[in-house]
Image (spheres, coloured by chain):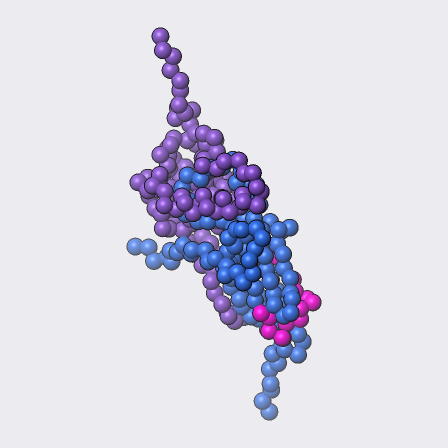
Amino acid sequence: MITAFADPFDALLSLQRELEARLASDWLSEMSASRGPFPPINVFQQGDDILALMELPGVDKNDLQIQAKANTIRISGKKRVEYANEASVHRRERVSGEFDRTLSLPVQFDPDGIKAEYRDGLLALYLPRAESDKPHSIKIK
Amino acid sequence: MATRQELQVQQKRELDKKEEDTVPARVFLPTADIYETDDALNVVLEMPGVEKNSVDIRVEDGVLKIGGRLDFSKYQGLQPLYTEYNVGHYSRSFRLPSRIDQNKIAAELKDGVLSLVLPKVEEAKPRTIQVK
């Protein structure tokens, strides 16, 4: 649980610890159709809604497809790493290739309200919770 | 049957710090490709989430030091539910060969990918030798 940070210098380390702790989370272990595959996803809760973040540096927007259906999101595309033909390679760490990943979430979201933003190599998916999925208070007669 | 190459997930490598930081936080090494052409040495680093004004490139004593800072205020109010990767600032250094002209280093950042062009000093450019 993220609490208000009294010391701004701790904020960064606290976030990193939170992310590290969630690596062992079993929240999605049954639901996620994939965990190992690329790209790695971080799922956050913002109020009632979900925000999914993925690191996809150097991907052309035309090479990226996002599909949403019911409670699953599918992210697919191609990451290109190309250099000039005359280049002589000293070190190669960047990976390139095709990816196709499906994420199933245990919540229903409103497919019309889904927003995707790709900036600075970070893909952010904003998934608003469906009205029908939000808890409703029931009056007792 | 798919014959295409599937992308593998790379775990982020943490930086081995030689000096201690006053602000405790984990710093990661950005993945890097280094290649050479006739005119220059090129270093390409992946630093997703880093904006142009958060990049710090400097050359000190023949060492090229690259730093990229993340804006953590974006994570305020977000509660992690399920995580597969950690986030942090980026830092990596390379010792430059003497044949690089340190005054002419150029850098470009696009979609989280930083491309550095390190031009070679004139005398270091390859010359073809004619065989008589």
What's the colour of chain B in the image? blue
Front-most of residues B21 and B36: B21
Where are the magenta residues, as a range? B95-110
Counting from the top left corner in percent of width and height, residue A48 is at 45, 29
Q: Is residue A15 left or right of residue A99?
A: right
What's the colour of chain A in the image? purple
Counting from the top left corner in percent of width and height, residue A84 is at 54, 66
Q: Quadrant of residue B100?
A: bottom right
Residue A30 visible in the current orientation: yes
Reply yes or no: does residue A106 show up in magenta: no
Residue at (54%, 63%) from the top-left corner? B18
Counting from the top left corner in percent of width and height, residue A47 is at 47, 30
Residue A76 visible in the current orientation: no
Q: Quadrant of residue A30?
A: top left
Reply yes or no: does residue B98 show up in magenta: yes
Residue at (46%, 46%) from the top-left corner? A17
| Above or below: residue B126 compared with residue B60 | below
- Residue farthest right in this picture: B103
Residue at (64%, 50%) from the top-left corner? B53
Residue at (60%, 91%) from the top-left corner? B132
| Above or below: residue A31 compared with residue B32 | above
Front-most of residues B62 and B97: B62
Counting from the top left corner in percent of width and height, residue A109 is at 41, 31
